[in-house]
Image (tube, helix red, strand yellow):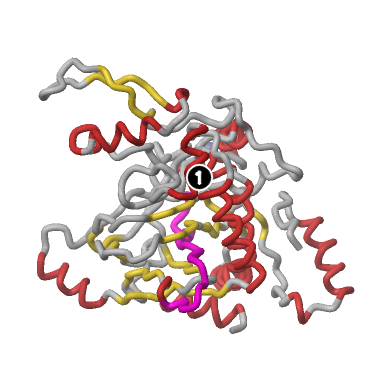
Amino acid sequence: MAHDAQARELGIEGYIVLPLSDADGISARAAFNKFVFDDKLPELTDSFNAIRKSVLNPLNTAGSFGACNMASAYHHPSSIAIDKIALKTARGTLHAYAKLHGLKYLSVVPDRMCFRTSTPGSESPHTDNTAGVEEESDVFFGGFLNLNPLGPDPNSAVQIMSLIPRSHKMKASFKGGDFSPAKGNKAYLKRLKAQMRGIEVKPNHMILFFENCMHEVLAKRILIPVRRKFTAFMLRVSHNEWCTCFDAYDGEKRKDERAKDDGHVLCPHRASEMTDQAALDHKGGVKGPMYPKLYWTNHVTKLATLTKQLQPKMLTERTFASGKRQGEVWLTPRQFPPSLHDLQSKYTYAADVSKRFHPVAIMEESDVDEEEESPQKRANGKRKRVACVPSSSEDEE
Ligand SMILES: [Zn+2]
């Protein structure tokens, strides 16, 4: 499908499923497996790293959602490589959508690796509304790549996204957070449930959906682990990087306040987190915690197991305030993980990847598919890009 047609479908339906090229699929799955099973991760103990290949929960994640919140999940070369493939796969569609709607800059928004091994907790129909909205015209897309093995029967590894097509809104909300309109209203909830569709995302495919498209998480038993990389994108009129530094200001004031701060086109906090290789705010506007709050009261033995598999710098002491363990001091994971700088385990890269979340200008003229493009035209396009694009995240071409 041509990019324009894809962009229209995305705009009308609120989502689109895109195939990865065979080569990109192979690279993305290999990168994912390297992160999850093979490479020594600096947050984990040597003994746990040595057996990760053979355990049920190789990323030592707490809770059933399976998203990995450690700093390495953002900065490991595999995460960078998969984000790059996601961008490459979605860029034509997103550019075409932006041009239809007068949006000028595309950003990759940080999101996480996911290895889900147990039935996820159900989430009732809701929309996501990320923090850090600058103008109502901002558009945030959530989504994921299905990185399950292709196998003899690819259908066995299909991942389902449950959403209501055409339920998205064209205006972003300044108020961040999940919004569940049917809470406490059984009749409305029933109506929403009836409109839900299970969208199939086969291995080697990615889904892109408006974050404010009504969706849900079903507590459905999983037969094989869900291998996923969450990916998110933002389209915006201004060249300001996505960040939440001005969320204390309401609505339109946010952009004005930001404009007063000359240094904040690119977020200085993000820049230092990228330098330190820290866990980042993911789409939603927060850092993911190392364990859900309820673990401390309901799953303390599970928490103790997770704790044993983490490096000492990942840990802190916590005292039971009440109950039969009152006064006991236990080691627990820190609520938020330290940076790789703090762990003295920063990754070194061959190329400068610090700019991978910077907004990149969308060209005015229509994007031409690479195979249709003459070398001369491509050379011209490249020159033009160099002239117009403030950052250099388009280096994979
Ligand atoms: Zn900022």
Q: How far across and how far down the image is residue 385, in percent?
A: 78, 60
> Element at badge 1?
helix
Depicted 200 relative to depicted 229: above or below: below
Asked where in the image residue 95 lies, by quadrant, the reply is bottom right
Type of amino acid at the residue the image marks with label 1: Lys
Q: How far across and how far down the image is residue 108, in percent?
A: 57, 54
Is residue 257 something one can see in this rendering? no
- Front residue of this view, candidates 18 and 363: 18
Q: Which residue is mark 1?
A: 255
Asked where in the image residue 298 lies, by quadrant, the reply is top left
- Front residue of this view, candidates 334 and 99: 334
Is residue 144 located in the magenta-colored stretch of the structure?
yes
Q: How far across and how far down the image is residue 106, in percent?
A: 60, 58
Residue in the picture at 47% in, 59% down = 228
Is residue 342 something one can see in this rendering? yes
- Front residue of this view, candidates 393 and 47: 47
Residue in the picture at 75% in, 56% down = 395
Instruction: State the quadrant of the N terminus.
Output: bottom right
Is residue 150 located in the magenta-colored stretch of the structure?
yes
Instruction: State the quadrant of the C terminus.
Output: bottom right
Sort mark 1 into few (<14), some (14-19) or many (20+) by Cα contacts within 10 Å: some
Mark 1 close to ligand 1, CB under 8 Å: no
What's the magenta region? 134-155
Depicted 317 relative to depicted 70: above or below: above
Q: How far across and how far down the image is residue 121, in percent?
A: 25, 55
